[in-house]
Amino acid sequence: MCIKVKKKGRRMKKIQVLGTGCPKCKKLTENAEAAAKEAGIEFEIEKVTDINAIMKFGVMMTPALVVDGEVKVVGKVLKVDEIVTMLSE
């Protein structure tokens, strides 16, 4: 699943949530989407559920959050405000 929200004049961030669909993975996806909207950025959210694709990131524990190809957090669900801060950097 992929969600895109575009706003003129801003660089789009690609947000990937790595996980197999567990409740924590779903919550991280919800929080990431809410954070991106709150931060007012263009974004694309992709759920990565294939274990081989997850392993390519070097991630051994899910859920994990990847922003623009960089693994930001592994094994925990960040709160919306924590993700907003991360996306604003």
Image: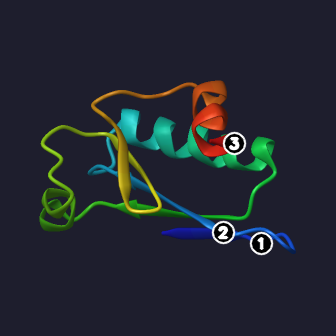
Tag 3–tag 1 contact (CB < 8 Å): no
Disc 2 designates what residue?
12
| In this picture, residue 57 sits left or right of residue 7 | left
Pointer 3 or 1: first along the chain: 1
Number of numbered discs present? 3
Disc 1 designates what residue?
6
Q: Is label 2 or label 1 in front?
A: 2
Question: What is the crowding at mark 2: few (fewer than 14 residues within 10 Å), some, or many (at least 20)?
Answer: some
Determine the CA span between mark 3 and mark 1.
14 Å
Numbered disc 1: secondary structure: loop
Q: Residue at x 58, y 44 (%)?
A: 32
Pointer 2 or 1: first along the chain: 1
What is the x, y in percent for residue 87? 62, 44
Farthest residue to the front: give it.
89
Residue 34: mark in rendering: 3
Question: What is the crowding at mark 3: few (fewer than 14 residues within 10 Å), some, or many (at least 20)?
Answer: some
Q: Residue at x 13, y 58 (%)?
A: 55
As displayed, is residue 2 above or below residue 63? Answer: below
Q: Dividing the picture into quarters, in which one does residue 49 lie?
A: bottom left
What is the x, y in percent for residue 1? 48, 69
Q: Dividing the picture into quarters, in which one does residue 24 lie?
A: top left
Tag 2–tag 1 contact (CB < 8 Å): yes
Numbered disc 3: secondary structure: helix
Residue type highlighted by circle 3: Ala
Residue type highlighted by circle 2: Met
Determine the CA span between mark 2 and mark 1.
7 Å
